[in-house]
Amino acid sequence: MIARDRTGSGGLRRGNLFGWLILIMALIAFAGALLLPPETAGTVAAGARAPSWSHPLGTDTLGRDLLARLLQGMRTTIAIGVTASLLALLAGTIYGGAAGLSRPRVDETLMRGVDIGLALPYMFVVILLVSLVDQRGFWLIAVVLGCVEWLPLSRVVRAGVRDLRNEGFIEAAAIMGGTRLYLLRAHLLPQLITPLVVYATLMLPVVMMQEAFLSFLGLGVPPPVASWGSLIAEGLRRLETAPWILLVSAGSLAFWLICLHAVGDRLARRLGSGGLR
């Protein structure tokens, strides 16, 4: 028992450390553009240069400062990931709540639609939707990813609503004339905040990885805007001549995702246990 408690405390401490690392890296990513000088303008003839005092992470194949490009890529991927996660959270909560409060036949119909959506190869659907649009940008990528990620979330919300709908305080509010929308907004959602926060924290690194994959394939935000995925793709093409591009971009993305998963695991343990120590 004592060993298990120590392990749990160690996990929480590691979660706190990763949380602070995420906060610091996010601040650097969004404030770094104000602190760094403008990106070095270059041409193909300039070529990629190894890390130096003037360029701590080196330059890309166009002679642009890789640190500045990396910070821009971090901002792009983080912003798209957060936006898509919020859209998925909103859509999944509304759809799952409506299904959980509906009559059995309507509930069954709505959830069969979710099952059909989950049966599709989601990444193939995302690539297909993005490929059909000529003008790709921030909002298109965020909306497409959000439209995919809300499906499993709706099942979580629906299950929570169905568990709570027969509670005494819900029946009392319904008897007093509360509409389904009122019951969902005022009584059910506050009870579901904990699982929604945990799920959203675990969903964010998944969405960020999907955005990086789209950018890696050339289906993300168009250049010259940088993304983690486009930097990794450039580093892979220049692996023999400029290996630092791939090392920096892929390593920073992997470190960020590890930190996010650690924070999500910490939230799942801490909020799931019902106690804040």
Image (cartoon, grey):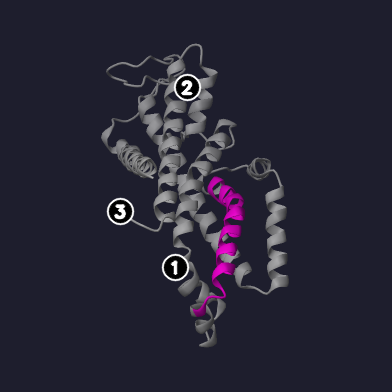
User: Picture coordinates of residue 245 (x, y %)?
Assistant: 44, 21
Q: Residue at x 40, y 35 (%)?
A: 72
Question: What residue did someone put label 2 on?
Answer: 246
Magenta highlight on residue 176 = no
153 left or right, relative to 80: right
Question: What residue did someone put label 1 on?
Answer: 190
Cα gap from disc 1 to disc 2, whole angstroms: 44 Å
- Along the line of sight, the residue nearer the viewer: 4 or 186: 4
* On-image quarter of the N terminus: top left
Which badge, 1 or 2, is on the more N-terminal residue? 1
User: Dot 1 lies on which element?
Assistant: helix
Q: Nearer the viewer, mark 1 or mark 3?
A: 3
Query: What's under tag 2, amino acid-wise?
Result: Leu
- Region of the chain picked out in magenta, as a range: 141-168
Query: What's under tag 1, amino acid-wise?
Result: Pro
Does residue 205 appear in the picture of this structure? yes
Classify mark 2: residues with Cα within 10 Å, few (<14), some (14-19) or many (20+).
some
231 left or right, relative to 102: left
User: Picture coordinates of residue 41 (x, y %)?
Assistant: 38, 24
Q: Nearer the viewer, mark 3 or mark 2?
A: 3
